[in-house]
Amino acid sequence: MLNPETRTLEVRLDVTNRNYRLKPDMYVR
């Protein structure tokens, strides 16, 4: 659910990360 104050939401993904380029708590736009 969208947070109206920060206009953000939490998303969970299950992806292959062979090169370990994705790290916990990274942000995307």
Image (tube, rainbow, N blue to C red):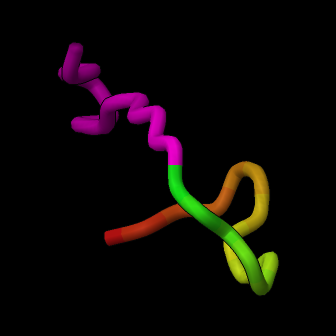
- At x 51%, y 43%, the residue is 14
Which is the main secondary structure of the residues drawn in magenta? loop
Q: Is residue 15 inside the magenta stretch?
A: no
The residue drawn where x is 77% and y is 85% is 19
Q: Is residue 3 above or below residue 9?
A: above
Q: Is residue 14 left or right of residue 6?
A: right
Residue that appears at 31% across and 37% down: 8
In this rendering, is residue 4 above or below 29?
A: above
Q: Nearer the viewer, residue 7 or 28?
A: 28
The quarter holding residue 3 reads top left
Residue 7, percent from left and from top: 23, 37
In the image, 6: left or right of 24?
A: left
| Magenta stretch holds residue 6 | yes
Give the residues in magenta.
1-14
For image coordinates 77% across by 64% down, the residue present is: 23
Q: Is residue 1 above or below residue 8?
A: above
Position of residue 22 measured from the top left corner of the image (x, y, whole percent): 68, 71
Front position in the image: 18 or 12: 18
Q: Is residue 7 left or right of residue 24?
A: left
Q: Is residue 1 above or below residue 19?
A: above
Q: Position of residue 24 (x, y in %)?
A: 77, 52
Q: Nearer the viewer, residue 28 or 14?
A: 14
